[in-house]
Amino acid sequence: MPRPRHFEIPADNPASLAVFYRALFGWKIERLPGWDYWPCKTGDGPGIDGALTKKTLYSGIVNNVTVDDSAPYLAKVVELGGKVLVPRSPVIGMGWYALAQDPEGNPVGFWQDDAVAGIPIQ
């Protein structure tokens, strides 16, 4: 059964929101160089980590679920009345990401680990 792995909190100003969550919870938050993406280390032990990101297609918190293959899940989203917002896309050298929306308009992300995602075969 797929489980939540990672959350994303969209923000107009991720740098300012990072200050808020650092002060509120003590989370370790640093911007990835060259990206407007701020990974959040929320602690050790049970729980999940996440990130702050610039607002784009959605305005709510996205829970990303780890799956073995996102394609059948994206097809099922559409079958069940939702829609795909971002098709399966490589995050180079890390994995595959996709974003969908449930029938009520809530975002749900899909993550698929793959260390060679998007790396050209030579």
Image: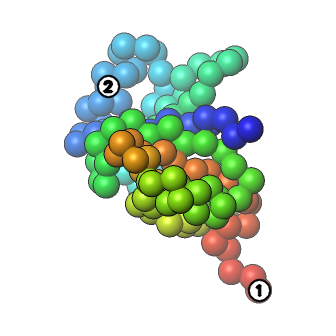
For marks 1 and 2, the one nearer the N-term is: 2
Quadrant position of the N terminus in the picture: top right
Can see residue 2? Answer: yes
Classify 10 Å Cα crowding around label 1: few (below 14), some (14-19), many (20 and above). few
Mark 2, residue position: 19
Could you tell me which residue is drawn at 31 percent across and 22 percent down? 20
Residue extending furthest left? 12
Q: Nearer the viewer, residue 80 or 13?
A: 80
Q: Are marks 1 and 2 in contact (CB under 8 Å)?
A: no
x and y percentages locating residue 43 in the rendered image: 59, 19
Q: What number of labels is visible?
A: 2
- How far across and how far down the image is residue 119, in percent? 67, 74
Q: Left of 29 or right of it: where is 94? A: right
* Number of residues whose C-alpha sits closer than 10 Å to that of mark 2, classed few (under 14), some (14–19) or many (20 or more): few
Residue sticking out furthest to the bottom: 122
Who is closer to the viewer here, 6 or 105?
A: 105
Find numbered disc 1 in the image and state the secondary structure of the residue it sits on: loop
Spot occupied by residue 74 in the image (x, y as percentages of width and height): 57, 59
Q: Does residue 43 sit above or below 56 in this rendering?
A: above
Residue 47, relative to residue 82: is it above or below?
above
**Picture residue at 43% right of the left edge, 47% below the top:** 102
Q: Which residue is mark 1?
A: 122
- Quarter of the image for residue 17 reads top left
Residue 53 appears in the rendering: no
Q: Is residue 16 left or right of residue 106?
A: left
- Please, what is the three-letter code of the amino acid marked with disc 2? Val
Spatial separation of the CA atoms under disc 1 and disc 2: 43 Å
Residue at 66% x, 35% y is 3
Q: Amino acid at mark 1?
A: Gln
Q: Above or below — where is 42 with respect to 64?
A: above
- Which element is circle 2 on? helix
